[in-house]
Amino acid sequence: MKQNRKKGVPATQPRYSKEEFAQRGDAIYERDIRPVVETGNEGRFVAIDIETGAYEVDADELAASDRLFARVPTAQVWLRRVGSRYARRFGGRG
């Protein structure tokens, strides 16, 4: 069994396709979370459990994820950045 970055804690395996994972995470963010965190959190990360809707916000994505896993050990975590459609951007900008 895989271990996550904390010793002795089993890594959570994905239970959804990439497409469903993204759809669920984005839907929860837009419907429930964005209206609450949008003001004053620009650029911060939101770690969302796509099964329960639980979330954590932090400037550090690992800190947000760690706090979420502490609350929901089996969380299926989707990351978003407040004010952006993505958590990270790769490649050049137009």
Image (tube, helix red, strand yellow):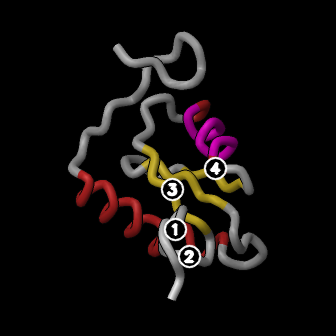
Percent of width and height locating residue 29: 48, 67
Mark 1 vs mark 2: which is more N-terminal? 2
Reading the image, the residue beneath label 2 is: 84
The quarter of the picture where residue 57 lies is bottom right
Q: Residue at x 48, y 70 (%)?
A: 91
Residue 76 figure quarter? top left
Callout 1 secondary element: loop
Query: Contact (CB < 8 A) between labels 3 and 1?
Result: no
Residue 55 coordinates in the image, percent (x, y): 57, 52
Main secondary-structure element of the magenta-colored stretch: helix
Q: CA distance from mark 3 to mark 2?
A: 11 Å
Of pointers 1 and 4, the one earlier in the residue sequence: 4
Tell me if label 1 and label 2 are in contact, CB under 8 Å: yes
First in residue order: circle 3 vs circle 2: 3
> Which part of the image, by quadrant, shows the N terminus?
top left
Residues 53 and 18: in front is 18
